[in-house]
Amino acid sequence: MTNLSVIENKISSIRKYLKILERYPEYSRKEIEENIDIRGAVERYLYLAAQAAIDLAEAVIAYRDLRKPATMSEAFYILNEEDIISGECADKMVRMVGFRNVIAHDYEKVNYDIVYDILHHRLKDIEEFIEKIESM
């Protein structure tokens, strides 16, 4: 069973990755895609933030002794079923899982419009998820 310190450590890790990602919105979509160093850093920290959010969801499920998810996405639906997060939050996080999978497995198919959108508009979805977990 997971204890609260595991959950707190996951939240701390996510916040660290989000803080690092704050450095990159100043770059244009084209700069992110074409500069190998910027692209690599952005992709890596987006991946780490998404993976840590998945790990956090799974830690909460273990802590609460909820049913075990069969997929990473299902973890967020379980949290919604248990009224820990909203359906809207679960849907946003499931889209983040999809993005994480592209970064992890189909990196040659990365859509930089999506990367740019996440960097500028979707990191708040992860922050919202953290806030819901902290308020449970």
Image (cartoon, grey):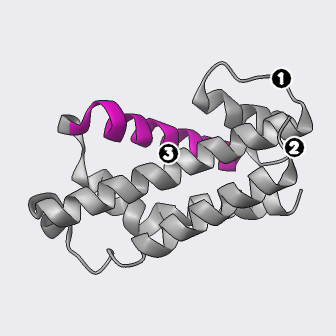
> Badge 2 is on which residue?
83
Secondary element under disc 3, as helix, strand or loop, is: helix
Is 52 left or right of 64, judged from the image as shown? Answer: left
Q: Judge whether 127 appears above or below 56 on screen.
A: below
Can residue 42 be spotted in the picture?
A: yes
> Badge 1 is on which residue?
67
Coordinates of residue 72 in the picture (x, y in percent): 59, 30
Coordinates of residue 97 in the picture (x, y in percent): 50, 39
Residue kind at label 2, given as amino acid type? Asp
Residue kind at label 3, given as amino acid type? Met
Task: Give the magenta-colored segment's residue range.
Answer: 88-107
Can residue 80 be spotted in the picture?
A: no
**Alpha carbons under labels 1 and 3: distance apart:** 22 Å
Secondary element under disc 1, as helix, strand or loop, is: loop
Coordinates of residue 86 in the picture (x, y in percent): 76, 48
**Alpha carbons under labels 2 and 3: distance apart:** 20 Å
Camera-side residue of 29 and 6? 6
